[in-house]
Image (tube, helix red, strand yellow):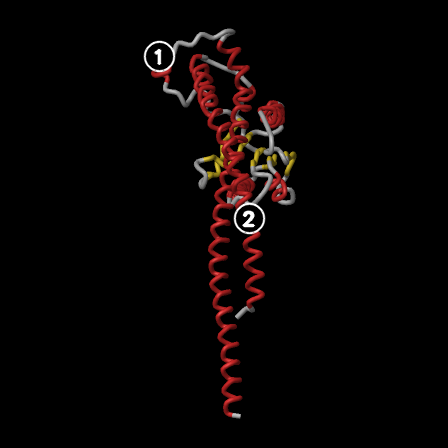
Amino acid sequence: MASLKDIKRKVGAVQKTKQITRAMNMVAASKFKAAQMRMDNFRPYAGKFMDVLNSLALRVESISHPLLAVREPKRIRVICMTADRGLCGGFNSNLIKATERFLREKTQDGKDVSLITVGRKSRDFFRKKANVINQYVDVFGKFDMTLAVAISNEVITPFIKEEYDELYLIYNQFVNVSVQKPTVVRLFPLPSIGQDVDAESDKRLDYLYEPSEEALLQKLLPMYVHVLVYRALLETSAGENGARMAAMDNATSNCEELIRSLTLKMNKARQAAITAELMDIVGGTEALAKG
């Protein structure tokens, strides 16, 4: 059995750890509230943007845009979004595993796959295991649409120049504080434009477009990529802080349970020490009485 001094030292160490995890939980909760508000405020805009874009595509009989070009997927580019920091449960590891599976499937099919990492954790993991052509680190502390535009512009121009054939976005879709679902979305070519809206129901909406529908669609297609990337950034930010909040809450509960267990051991050790001292006293008294 460990000595009373050792157990007291362990209790003190666990209590300090509990203070740290509780503080991290409070900080994550504050950041999560702000990140969730931004995400919830942007979701209606993203949904309405897609409705209008699909409505435009349904009204245009033929549209020729480089982002709609379908080519044989020999070269594939992937955007992988993780957090910049750890201590958030399986948030990063689950996404990295999903990305690994995706890269393995594509490379086994003979595809040339390159990677753009967003977040320090994905950069650190893949920089020696994949062809990382660019990286964005320490971006989730404070970001806005400018970051989404920068990432989007980096992939739009090479696709138009036919430097690669398909683009995928892999990120954690926020479901709730405890659940973040790794999601794979194909960005290029854009297959869903004009296919996700019921044509009969859409005819009820009478939009007035200025300038022409074709000109608007040409302008909105790049913005479509900006919106999807920015939404993924918001989902990742909210998911990271939610996962860290849950992880630190579990860690605090584990610390409390460990403190209770160690306190019980400390009390048993103290009782054993007191009993041993009493036995020594009784033994000494008996020896004196016999003498």
Where residue 79 sits, quadrant-wise, is top right
Number of the front mark, 2 or 1: 2
Residue wearing tag 1: 204
Find numbered disc 1 in the image and state the secondary structure of the residue it sits on: loop
In primary-sequence order, the first of circles 2 and 1 is 2
**Image height check: is 32 above or below 160?**
below
Could you tell me which residue is drawn at 48 percent across and 10 percent down?
213
Could you tell me which residue is drawn at 36 percent across and 20 percent down?
198
How many marks overall? 2
**Image height check: is 117 above or below 266?**
above
Residue wearing tag 2: 19
From the top left corner, tell me how far across and down residue 23 is, in percent.
55, 43
Residue type marked 1: Arg
From the top left corner, tell me how far across and down residue 106 is, in percent.
54, 39
Residue type marked 2: Gln
Q: Is residue 105 visible?
A: no
In-front residue for pair 61/30: 30
Cα–Cα gap, marks 2 and 1: 58 Å
In-front residue for pair 159/95: 95
